[in-house]
Image: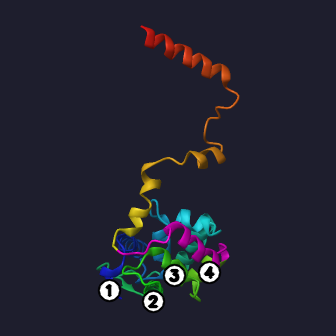
Amino acid sequence: MRMDKLTSRFQQGLNEAQSLAVGRDHSAIEPVHLALALLEQEGGMRPLLEQAGIKPDLLRSKLNTAMERLPKVGSPDGNVTVSPDLNRLLNLTDKAAQTRGEQFISSELFFVAGLDDQGPFGEALKAAGARRESLEKAITAVRGGAKMDNANAEENRQALDKYTTDLTARARSGKLDPVIGRDEEIRRAIQILARRTKN
């Protein structure tokens, strides 16, 4: 697979997965390394997974448990390779992107490919509630019909989340101060503001 065909977020995830493998003295980058790296990215996979009915915290826990079970052999020079399992999943991800007619391979398709994994990553996904149909539907909803036509497509589509505050979501979660029932405070604020404009 050509690395230049990965979105910048996916490339960053691979770099972070390599750091995870090196830091834990693993000899190869496994699918669980990459999945955890993508899950931990700021503004990354968490909203999409939640929309697909997947429990990100449970998935993180399962991935960490799977990583703890990997043999520690650390190389003195810090070189790690891509495992055959990860290579196979990356090829499946590439195929999924080609099937969609996309020029770049996005990180969310790695999680779709992970549903075909018979190893710890696939088991963790299924245990966290992943289902192909709901994941595909969430990807379509998040993308809004857009294709991955440039390396920064994943960052561009989340610009609204990055630079704005979703007041509706905050109100639903009880994090927004309610205005209803606060008539007296509102009247008092208007009186104070009206006085200041007269002076």
- Closer to the chain start, of discs 2 and 1, is 1
How far is mark 2 from mark 1, CA to CA?
12 Å
Mark 2 falls on what kind of element? helix
Mark 1 falls on what kind of element? loop
Residue furthest out toward the top: 199
How far is mark 4 from mark 3, CA to CA?
27 Å
Residue 173 appears in the figure: no
Instruction: Please identify the quarter of the rendering in which residue 148 is found.
Output: bottom left
Nearer to the camera, 10 or 162: 162
Crowd band around label 3 with a 10 angstrom C-alpha radius: few (<14), some (14–19), many (20+): some
Between tags 3 and 2, which lies in front?
2
Crowd band around label 1 with a 10 angstrom C-alpha radius: few (<14), some (14–19), many (20+): few
Name the amino acid, label 3: Leu
Look at mark 2 in the image and give the residue it sits on.
95
In the picture, the disc for residue 156 is none
Residue 1 is left or right of residue 62, and the answer is left
Name the amino acid, label 4: Arg
Between tags 3 and 1, which lies in front?
1
Name the amino acid, label 2: Lys
Crowd band around label 2 with a 10 angstrom C-alpha radius: few (<14), some (14–19), many (20+): some
* 173 vs 27: above or below: above
Residue pictured at 56% horizontal, 19% vertical: 189
Residue pictured at 34% horizontal, 71% vertical: 8
How far is mark 3 from mark 2, CA to CA?
28 Å
Look at mark 1 in the image and give the residue it sits on.
2
Magenta-colored span: 127-149
Between tags 2 and 1, which lies in front?
2
- Residue 146 is one of the magenta-drawn residues: yes
